[in-house]
Amino acid sequence: MTQTKNKWIRQDEDEHASNDYGFGGVYHMTHLIRDRLKFEEIEQIMSEITQATEGAEGIDYLQVFKKDGQKIYVIDNVSKTDLKNGRFKGSDEPYHYHTIMFSSEY
């Protein structure tokens, strides 16, 4: 778990995590995230996910961040295996994305 004062804290992955996701697609956010978080907070969350994927085989499709009793989910929709096996090619690439949302929106 990443320890950062007054910032969103990335939670440890579940022991049953798939670890087959690289968060390499386009980011999307819900309206609530856009309206309630500062740009710097969103940037911090995305930066931590990027750092977690660097040099790793992969991370779980669901990344959880907590702050002040709130939870944020960042969800990747395409695994590295699917990308490697050619599931997404050409016109399918726009469908490789990650969504950032409050847990209450899930």
Image (cartoon, grey):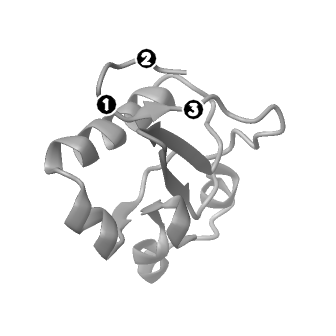
Residue drawn where x is 54% and y is 57% of the image: 76
Residue that carries the numbered disc 2 in the rendered image: 3
Q: Is residue 88 left or right of residue 38?
A: right
> Along the horizontal axis of the image, is 86 left or right of 17?
left
Residue 61, how many percent across, how many down? 62, 51
Are dots 1 and 2 in contact, CB under 8 Å?
Answer: no
Name above or below for residue 80 compared with residue 49. below
Depth check: give the residue in front, 106 or 89.
106
Label 1 to label 3, Cα distance in Å?
12 Å
Q: Secondary structure beneath disc 2?
A: loop
Callout 2: few (<14), some (14-19), or many (20+) C-alpha neighbours within 10 Å? Answer: few
Tell me the residue that label 1 is attached to. 7
Residue at the far right in the pictured view: 16
Question: Residue at coordinates 54% horizontally, 60% vertically from top-left?
Answer: 103
Q: SS of the residue at dot 1? A: loop
Viewer-proximal residue, 51 or 69?
69
Task: Report the residue at 75% width, 36% height from top.
Answer: 14
Q: Which residue is mark 3?
A: 11
**Quadrant, the N terminus:** top right
Residue found at x 35% / y 40%: 45
Identify the amino acid type marked 3: Gln
Residue 23 lies, with reference to residue 11, above or below; the image says: below
| Residue 9 horizontal side relative to residue 26, left or right | right
